[in-house]
Image (cartoon, rainbow, N blue to C red):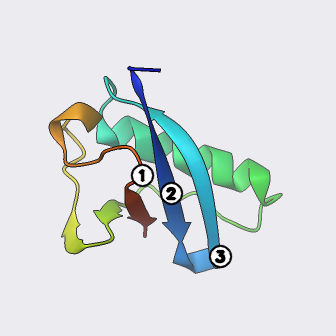
């Protein structure tokens, strides 16, 4: 599992948290698209996908750059990431 990280995804919009594995060699923008699609399916359409959402570090209010690979960010195993 060296190529994946286990993170805690916090989704305030639906007041939910999810533990998920994300690949380290994928761009943050791609991860956002996958999360949008997955949450729409998991919530049976309650959560509506929106391409303007971003990922944020729970300790820092700055959004992750969508063009960076996950391994180029400070996301590590056990990170809390907010999806807004």
Find residue 51 and report its image quarter: bottom left
Q: Mark 2 points at which residue?
A: 8
From this view, report whether residue 52 is shown above or below residue 42.
below
Residue 14, label in figure: 3
Q: Earlier in the sequence, mark 2 or mark 1?
A: 2
Residue 78, label in figure: 1
Across and down, in percent, residue 54 comes to 35, 60
Q: How many marks?
A: 3
**Residue pictured at 28% horizontal, 36% vertical:** 70
Gap in angstroms between the C-alphas marked 2 and 1: 7 Å
Q: How crowded is mark 2: few (under 14 residues within 10 Å), some or many (20 or more)?
A: some
Across and down, in percent, residue 5 comes to 42, 36
Gap in angstroms between the C-alphas marked 1 and 3: 21 Å
From this view, report whether residue 75 is shown above or below residue 67.
below
In the drawing, does residue 15 fall left or right of residue 29?
right
Q: Residues within 10 Å of mark 1 (few under 14, many from 20)?
A: few
Of badges 2 and 1, the one in the foreground is 1
């Amino acid at each position: 599992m060296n190529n994946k990280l286990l993170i805690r995804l916090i989704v305030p919009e639906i007041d939910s948290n999810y533990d998920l594995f994300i690949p380290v060699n994928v761009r943050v923008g791609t991860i956002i698209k996958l999360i949008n699609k997955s949450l729409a399916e998991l919530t049976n359409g309650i959560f509506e996908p929106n391409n303007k959402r971003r990922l944020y570090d729970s300790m820092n209010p700055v959004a992750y750059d969508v063009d960076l690979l996950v391994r180029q960010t400070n996301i590590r195993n056990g990170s809390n990431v907010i999806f807004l």
